Structures are given as structure tokens and as C-alpha cells.
Amino acid sequence: MSRTFRLAESFISINGEGQHAGELALFIRFTGCDLRCAWCDTMWANEPDAPHKKVTADDLLGIAEDAMAQGVGNVTLTGGEPLLQEGISELITALVKLGLRVEIETNGSVALAPFTGEHRPVFTMDYKLPSSGMEKKMLIENIPLLKTDDTLKFVCGSAEDLQRAYEVITETKPQCGIYLSPVFGCIEPADMVEFMKEKKLGNVRLQLQLHKFIWDPQKKGV
């Protein structure tokens, strides 16, 4: 594979969210995103020409092999929006063939169907709620494609967001893991728990971003 990718950073840390939260993972972050969420915590990586270095797929596979040698079995492709990278499908296939559990953190605006073939990754997909300003970009048809090992995440910054998340969950009946996550500093997690109780959301999990409690919320590379 001779394609190049816009690598913003790569590092080993713990998964801060999703079904494998707390496990070690290699993070590969690319630049470029098609959304501009009001509360985005990686805005610095959103422009395609944000600080980055050009790397080949072989370079990234080398980074992955080094991580595996350190006992890491998870790799998370993130951004920005990783599915916008040219050649990302081939990279996903190569990482899966290495024996890694490949997770894609995707923003809900990119069609998942082209990536659900033989070497399917695990998806952690956001559904952007009203406070993000980006709900109109959401592809609701992605939700039925999510399987048991995948995650549908609703980042909530207000009571309106919680209500909208409830509506989407009720209407689409996802068959994957469903998570509510607070916008850091904007909504009280205790209020979210009360909402879950009120709406009888027994199949939904509240999740706090672990890395923002372990390290400074603005720290990169964690």
C-alpha cells in the first residue's frame, strides 16, 4: 500500500470510553473532520492541514506491531473523522489481519456500509445531539448496521440532548451497546442517572471519559 495518511499523533493509553473502557489501546489519530461540533475536544485536529506528518500504511503497521509487542491488542482509529482518510479501508483490513481488535471512532455522518465487509472493524459511533449543532448531518441508517460489539454513543450537554437521545433510542431500537456520556463540565452526571431512571433505560450505560479524570482534560496523547 503506497497511500499516505495524515497522522496527527499515535500513542498507547487506555480506552477512555466504549465497551473496552479501561483497556490498553494504541490510538492512531488522523487530521480532518467534516463536522464542527460546538463542544468538540479535539478541534485542533479537525482541519486537514492541522499539525501532522505524512505516513504510509507500512509506517502505521510498524507502529501497530510495536504496540502488540508491548502487549496491546486494541487499536483505535480516531480523529478528526478517520473514515475520511483515503485508503482507510485497506488499512483497517491490514490491521485486522495482524490480529488486532480494530475500533473506529466515527462521528455519525459517514456511511458505515462500505466498511462492514469481511474484515469488519468495531464501530464506536456518535449520534450528534442538538447542543452539538450537527444533528442534521447524522445518518440514521447507520444505526441498524451496528452489532453487539459496537457502540452507539450520545454525548449530552443539556436536558434537551437527553430527551433527543431517548427519542432516537426508542425509535431505532439499537442492537449494540448504548452509552450516554456528558459533555465535560456542561451537565451533571447525577442528573443523567435520574433521567435514565425516569425513562427506564435499563439497557443504556452512563459513561464518563476516564482519561479526563486521570489526566488534565486538555492533555494530548492520552
Image: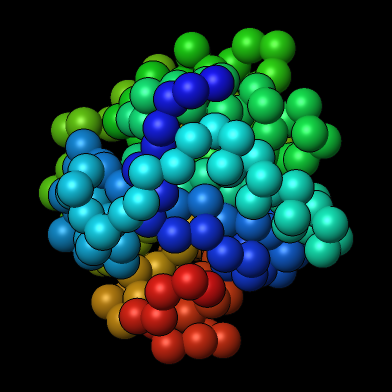
When asked about the image quadrant of residue 99, the answer is top right
Q: Nearer the viewer, residue 26 or 42?
A: 26
Side (left or right) of 204 relative to 163: right
Q: Please name the residue shown 74% across and 55% down the image.
A: 66
Q: Is residue 121 above or below residue 194?
A: above
Compare residues 1 and 104 and report the one nearer the observer: 1
Of residues 195 and 79, which is closer to you in this image? 79
Position of residue 38 in the picture relative to residue 125 (left or right): left
87 relative to 197 in the view: left or right = left
Location of residue 182 with respect to 72 vertically, above or below? below
| Rendering coords of residue 151 (x, y %) | 58, 42
Q: Residue at x 43, y 25 (%)?
A: 3
In the rendered image, residue 131, in percent from the top left (x then y), is placed at 19, 57
Asked whether residue 24 is in view, the answer is: yes
Q: Is residue 179 visible?
A: no
Residue name at image x 48 percent, y 12 percent: 114
| Residue 210 position (above or below residue 51) | below
Q: Is residue 105 left or right of residue 60?
A: left
Q: How is the image coloured?
A: rainbow
- Give the total number of marks visible in the rendering: 0
Quadrant occupied by the N terminus: top right
At which x and y percent is residue 133? 14, 49
Q: Position of residue 82 (x, y in %)?
A: 41, 38
The quadrant in which residue 32 appears is top left
Residue plotted at (49% across, 13% down): 113
